DNA sequence: CGTGAAATTCTTAGATG
DNA sequence: CATCTAAGAATTTCACG
């Protein structure tokens, strides 16, 4: 277990802002929190190296690129053998329609967030990943009508 | 319904890369896809203005900032009245523990992805948003053991 | 779209508390 | 040890062809 890096109030202030906008300049952040641009950049560099900041990414609107539908799929495995779970996890992550893969305890074993161009695309996905897999006992699909909080912001 | 903007192969190439790393330079992208740095930047600017790129954000490791637990919560409302659904949706989005809020059809009405510092924090969350709400018939909690695909990449 | 210049931002170096 | 200022390098933006 890697011990948590020490973050002070400046670090948290910086994280709050870059979670909302990664293109904000060091100068702008510095002016708001009372630090020079160089100090902000140095802290950002450290936060990246420590993997407190895992990545800086562009969020693309799924609808703008033809992915008009989203689904939440809860998957229940036949028997909870570690190698089977790992195999499914790897297959799910490798599938381009899978946006998020949560490995959970409870009624389901996996919760997947899935996008698709249309119903045919989604059906092809279920056949590929779910129907053709004998280790899957059962799965339920929920159609997403709307989503909020696309870019997550953690409470600091 | 806003008509989808026209994207060519260059745009899709650019989107593929900035979804993985928003800090990649225009020059680097240009070298890979055969465009000048200026042309890449021009296209990026257009994709931002068209809201094809919704945002560019830093992804922070929840564990690194003390959010050690994650949950998937499926919420079933008492009666599906539009104003009630909207009210819950707004309350969920406003809650700092809620990372994602999906409004779905199926057995549940909402699927929430929730983070918490510890079990007490999660209990406080359920009381605040769920137990104290008479419009909620039922909810089920799944504890997240692991997650993959933090930064989503859309198939283009 | 590409080129090249101008403006902005990031990085590095040296000095200070 | 982290900060600041200032110089230097890199990136983005802009005007023109």
Image (cartoon, coloured by chain):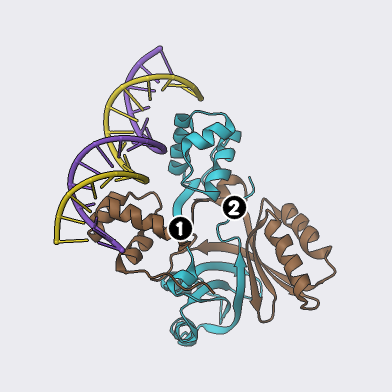
Chain colours: A brown, B cyan, C yellow, D purple
* Residue A65 vertical placement versus B126 (above, below): above
Q: At x 76% / y 57%, what residue is drawn?
A: A123
Do tags 1 and 2 sit on the same chain?
no
Q: Position of residue A125 (x, y in %)?
A: 75, 57
Q: At x 61% / y 79%, what residue is drawn?
A: B142
Label 2 SS: loop
Whether residue B83 is visible: no
Q: Position of residue B117 (x, y in %)?
A: 46, 79
Label 1 SS: helix
Find disc 1 in the rendering and name its residue: A49
Specify whether A41 is left or right of A48: left
* Residue B132 vertical placement versus A19 (above, below): below
Q: Position of residue B149 (x, y in %)?
A: 60, 60
Q: Dot 1 falls on which chain? A: A
- Which residue is at the front of the view, B41 or A34? A34
Nearest to the eye among marks 1 and 2: give it: 1
**The C terminus of chain B lies in which quarter of the figure?**
top right
Give the tally of numbered discs.
Answer: 2
Determine which of the numbered discs, if any, sits on residue B153 in the image.
Answer: 2
Q: Position of residue B99 (x, y in %)?
A: 49, 68
Q: At x 69% / y 52%, what residue is drawn?
A: A118
Q: Dot 2 falls on which chain? A: B
Specify whether A124 is left or right of D10: right
Whether residue A73 is visible: yes
> Residue A35 sits in which quadrant?
bottom left
Label 1 to label 2: alpha-carbon separation: 23 Å
Circle 1 crowding by C-alpha within 10 Å: few under 14, some 14–19, many from 20: few
């Amino acid at each position: 277990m890697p011990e948590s890096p020490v973050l002070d109030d400046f670090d948290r202030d910086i994280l709050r802002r870059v979670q909302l906008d990664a293109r904000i300049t060091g100068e702008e952040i510095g002016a708001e929190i009372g630090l020079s641009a160089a100090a902000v950049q140095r802290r950002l560099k450290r936060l990246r190296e420590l993997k407190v900041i895992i990545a800086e990414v562009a969020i693309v609107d799924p609808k703008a690129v033809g992915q008009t539908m989203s689904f939440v799929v809860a998957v229940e495995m036949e028997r909870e053998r570690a190698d089977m779970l790992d195999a499914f996890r790897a297959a799910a992550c490798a599938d381009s329609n899978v946006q998020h893969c949560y490995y959970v305890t409870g009624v389901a074993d996996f919760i997947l967030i899935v996008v698709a161009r249309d119903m045919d695309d989604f059906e092809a996905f279920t056949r590929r990943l779910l129907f053709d897999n004998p280790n899957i006992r059962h799965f339920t699909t929920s159609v997403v009508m709307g989503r909020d909080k696309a870019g997550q912001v953690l409470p600091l």
